[in-house]
Image: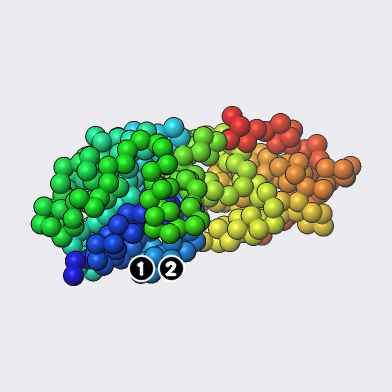
Amino acid sequence: MRHCLALLSGGLDSILAIRLMQQQGIGVEAVNFKTVFTCCQDQSAQAARDLNVPLTVIGQDADYLDLIKTPKFGYGRGANPCVDCRIYMFEKAKHYMEQVGADFIISGEVVGQRPMSQKRRDLERISYHSELEDLLLRPLSAKLLPPTLPERKKWVDRSQLYDFHGRSRKGLIELAKRFGMEDIPSPSTGCALTETRFSKKVFDLNLRQPTSGLWDYGLLTIGRHFRLNAEVKAIVGRHESENLQLEYLHQLPDATSSALLRPREFSGPAVLLIGPMEKETLAFAGGLIMRYGSAQDLSSEATIEVLGREGTLFLAPTACRSAQSAVPITEC
Ligand code: SF4
């Protein structure tokens, strides 16, 4: 019995690709690729349960950021370097395939479905640069692509594969119904890099702090981000769970934050400060607490704990006008 490794996002396409292999009696093991920018691991775990396949989650390493900063094949609509990212994913999957002794890899990619990474030329690039070449089979569009090794060796019956192309989901949904699927997952990349507003934070970091590591990029998914100058940024928690996340991140060994500020004796957000802790920057961060906290109505100074310095900041509501007018990076 032949075995393949499937990239499983939990979306309809990857589910159907696996069903097509199972229909031919091929054993399937799945991997889900997780980055600091993706969500939807629950969706892939649920899909793996429904499909009755083992699932392994593979994360990115620090070198993933090279393609976020300088992608060889460029960005999509946002800060999404999809072709480079897919090559990276498949390189990781290839390594895992060799570890577990699978015979080939499948994915749910459909020719022409996504403008950034699924044009025929992109699919060829991904196969080539990941060094999978013809060990990478796309069952949903296989009939539009040259026969891969599993097809030529007759491990997979090509006649039972498909020639889907383009953005329409109609044929895919019909196929899902033939497989008896009732809940059809709606299309979503689950990747923040494709969002225009989020991308502004990524490009800001790429430009202003080009040596940033995974900690800094992961932080982009939390809170409102304000930039005071090239060196200084303040991140404001939008609700208590983000406040707690900021506190947690501040304590991690690879944290680049210089201080965490929290209001004392009034309610308000946590603010994480990136950059030198100086009078002006502390006043800026403290001013953001005043702006989003209940101390706005106070006429006297407010007390703010500076956890990174184990100190206290006394700040009048009018002390930091730049914080009152600051615009989040996502709205710049
Ligand atoms: S949408 Fe995000 S995770 Fe998916 S290929 Fe593009 S960059 Fe990678």
User: What is the quadrant of the N terminus in the image?
Assistant: bottom left
Left or right: 37 in relation to 101: right
Q: Callout 2, which amino acid?
A: Arg
Depth check: give the residue in front, 47 or 126. Answer: 47
Q: Secondary structure at mark 1?
A: loop
Depth check: give the residue in front, 262 or 303. Answer: 262
> Which residue occupies 24% across, 56% down?
105
Residue, far top = 332
Circles 1 and 2: CB atoms closer than 8 Å? no
When asked about the image quadrant of residue 296, the answer is: top right
Q: Is residue 116 visible?
A: no
Left or right: 142 in relation to 48: left
Say if 252 sits above or below 68 in the image: below
Q: Position of residue 25 (x, y in %)?
A: 24, 66
Left or right: 212 in relation to 153: right
Q: Secondary structure at mark 2?
A: helix
Depth check: give the residue in front, 23 or 291. Answer: 23
* Mark 1 lies on residue: 53
* Mark 2 lies on residue: 49
Q: Position of residue 127 (x, y in %)?
A: 21, 45
> Which residue occupies 35% across, 35% down?
166
- Marker count (numbered): 2
Q: Position of residue 149 (x, y in %)?
A: 13, 53
**Colour scheme employed for the rendering of this structure:** rainbow
When asked about the image quadrant of residue 101, the answer is: bottom left
Circle on res. 317? none
Say if 125 sits above or below 177 in the image: above
Residue, far front = 178
Q: CA distance from mark 1 to mark 2?
A: 7 Å
Q: Is residue 251 visible?
A: yes
Left or right: 272 in relation to 253: right
> Which residue occupies 62% across, 36% down?
328
